[in-house]
Image: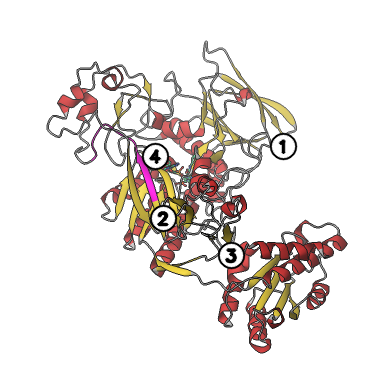
Amino acid sequence: MMADALRIGVYVCHCGTNIAGVLDTADLARFASGLPHVHVARDYKYMCSEPGQELIRQDIREYGLNRIVVAACSPHLHEATFRKVLQEAGLNPYLLAIANIREHVAWITADRESGQKRARAQIAAAVGRVARQRPLEPSSYPVTPRVLVVGGGIAGIQAALTLADAGKEVILVEREPTIGGHMAKFDKTFPTLDCAACILTPKMSAVKEHPRIRLLTYSEVESVQGSAGRFKVKVRRRPRYIREDLCVGCLQCIEACVFKALKIPNEFDLGLAKRKPIYLPFPQAVPPVPVIDPQTCLRLRTGKCKQTCVEACADRQAIDFEQQEWIEEYEVGAIIIATGFRTFDPTPLAYYGYGRFPEVYTALEVERLLNASGPSGGEIVLRDGATPRVVGIVHCVGSRDHNYHPYCSRVCCMYALKLAHLIRERCGAEVYNFYIDIRAPGKAFEEFYERTQKEGVHFVRGKVGEVERLSTNGDGLRLMVTVEDSLLGRVRKIPVDMLILAVALEPAEGAEQVRQLFHISCSSEGFFLEKHPKLAPVNTASDGVFIAGACQGPKDIPDTVAQADAAAAQALALIDRGVVEAEPNIAWVDENVCSGCRVCVSLCPFDAITPDEEKQVAVIDPTLCKGCGTCVAACPSGAAHQDLFSTEEILAELEGILAQ
Ligand SMILES: Cc1cc2nc3c(=O)[nH]c(=O)nc-3n(C[C@H](O)[C@H](O)[C@H](O)COP(=O)(O)OP(=O)(O)OC[C@H]3O[C@@H](n4cnc5c(N)ncnc54)[C@H](O)[C@@H]3O)c2cc1C
């Protein structure tokens, strides 16, 4: 386009007082109106609102504007909104530039004068670059109508069932031998005291039986390629040494195993019970197919074993010691990540005595004790079989603690109250809660707190400073808890038999690898980051990848289920659209300049570049390229280019900034 045919409109947003409270927006509009090719410049209270959008549409039509600059918030928030405005007014949507004067200036500026200068520079830079931008045409492609769900806790289960019931195919990948996640470990759930198994196990079997769900347990996603609408995923499947297609779950192989001494800690029971080398994590596991642990199985370790398990399975011949790891490949249109959390290990907080004193437990361990199919059949007993007479529960272990996790784990107060209620119900013990303050903001939570108070549960407001082990001879209690009671204003010593630590929720093991695999971001604590905390709470920065449940942050089961359904709805919306428009601002290679050096091939984080052996040039697959610009920056011969980030555009942007 000829330079004098340029007609640029500049729109400065007040964003309420977010921008206008710090910057003089009228001055910025006046300044913009003096920049080259600027035909109209205006400021308005909320540019993203309907009247703000209409202002831009009207100006485009009335003044024949052919480039637009919006000086407002981050393009992450409203670039798509304003591109749509251009399109509605008949302009190519890629003739837009955003000057981020909210996050990059107003929100981080203490000094108004220097802020005003920086905002002017940002606007001048955007005007400079938009003048060089060219219209781009997005290509569109069909969406694969299948969804990958990663993680088979209550979040993954709920999302998978919602999608499958809506007629979509689902691949559900769970790394453990069974689905169910943490909820499968609980006996009852707060605040309603529903039996966890009664609400979870029917859903687990519905997953297994659903004709549209392919359940891959004991498996992990190995690689992900592609973009929203057409991802290619490789799943690594670990050998159970028992064929799922032949096993009927009779469990006779476990009975028959010669390994009689139960010495191996059962991971599902957190080591409170033992298992054989061939085992089912818990009786209601889904799929109900045992696993053989290669570390402890005599046949797999030494080759020397009578193999009585094979004899017991002679009819089905499901045991297969030759099984190896294998890879399965799937094409999916959308991905939901639901990899949950892990609990904080309190061992470093030595003053609580966890790992030193057998009477000190984590809350999750006590959940297993309380569970009817757990190691003690639901009885509250200590490791030596004795019933505790007095139990202490310490709140906020690892949470709200700047040495570990500064955040509140949201569910600990409530699960501590639940444990207090259940312990009193099961063994009649006196229960002391040592708390900082009780956080019970959910539906019916406060009522549950009151109920436990009426049931005689004691509450001591204060931090536990020390736990000592007393002599276990005679009838005395076993531990002495020293706590500074901040309501009474004095240090108290309270003897107990059992101490339970209400541990924090933290990102699941391997969360960082999952983050890298799916190209999503995480918060400073390591929980996965939503695209926008209010407007896009289940979307991520990677289009087509959604998050649900405690992998996004600590939350209870009702919130997890609601979020899982929200993620399923977003995945459905993407799939049912049928086609996806690909971002056209991707990289391309000028074959006449490319020397075929292959520097870009190894650097591309999306495996989008392959060498063409015949022509000796690099070829970029436009369906895999995400426009990150790595190859453009690295190319030694300047053969790699990217629309919307051309050298000309970037230099014009720099000129705009430096001229101020
Ligand atoms: C002690 C305790 C008691 C609680 N009691 C209650 C209660 O009574 N009521 C209540 O509402 N909430 C309670 N909660 C909170 C509840 O546990 C969570 O809300 C819920 O478990 C979150 O579900 P999720 O599916 O997001 O995560 P999880 O339950 O953690 O499930 C995640 C699943 O993903 C799998 N996974 C992880 N990484 C991968 C990977 N890379 N690939 C494949 N699979 C992977 C895991 O193996 C797991 O199966 C309690 C929490 C604790 C710690």
**Residue 108: x %, y % from top left:** 77, 56
Q: Tell me the mark number nearer the camera, choosing from 4 and 2.
A: 2
Q: How many marks?
A: 4
Residues drawn in magenta: 233-244
Taking the spot 66% from the left edge, 41% from the top edge, the residue there is: 406
Disc 1 residue type (three-letter) = Leu
Furthest toward the bottom, the residue is: 62
Q: Tell me the mark number nearer the camera, choosing from 1 and 3.
A: 3
Q: Work out whether residue 527 can be spotted.
A: yes
**Residue 132: x %, y % from top left:** 67, 71
Name the residue that disc number 2 marks: 231
The numbered mark, 1 or 2, whose residue comes first in the sequence reads 2
Q: How far apart are marks 3 and 2 (CA)?
A: 23 Å
Q: Tell me the mark number nearer the camera, choosing from 4 and 1.
A: 4
**Residue 97: x %, y % from top left:** 66, 69
**Residue 450: x %, y % from top left:** 56, 46
Name the residue that disc number 1 marks: 487
- Asked if disc 1 and disc 3 are in contact, CB closer than 8 Å, the reply is no
The numbered mark, 3 or 4, whose residue comes first in the sequence reads 4
Choose between 42 and 276: the one closer to the eye: 42
Residue 399's tag is none
Q: Does label 4 point to a residue whose CB lies under 8 Å from ligand 1?
A: yes
Left-right relation of 305 to 144 = left
The numbered mark, 4 or 1, whose residue comes first in the sequence reads 4
Quarter of the image where one finds residue 460: top right
Q: How far apart are marks 4 and 2 (CA)?
A: 20 Å
Q: How far apart are marks 1 and 3 (CA)?
A: 65 Å
Name the residue that disc number 4 marks: 175
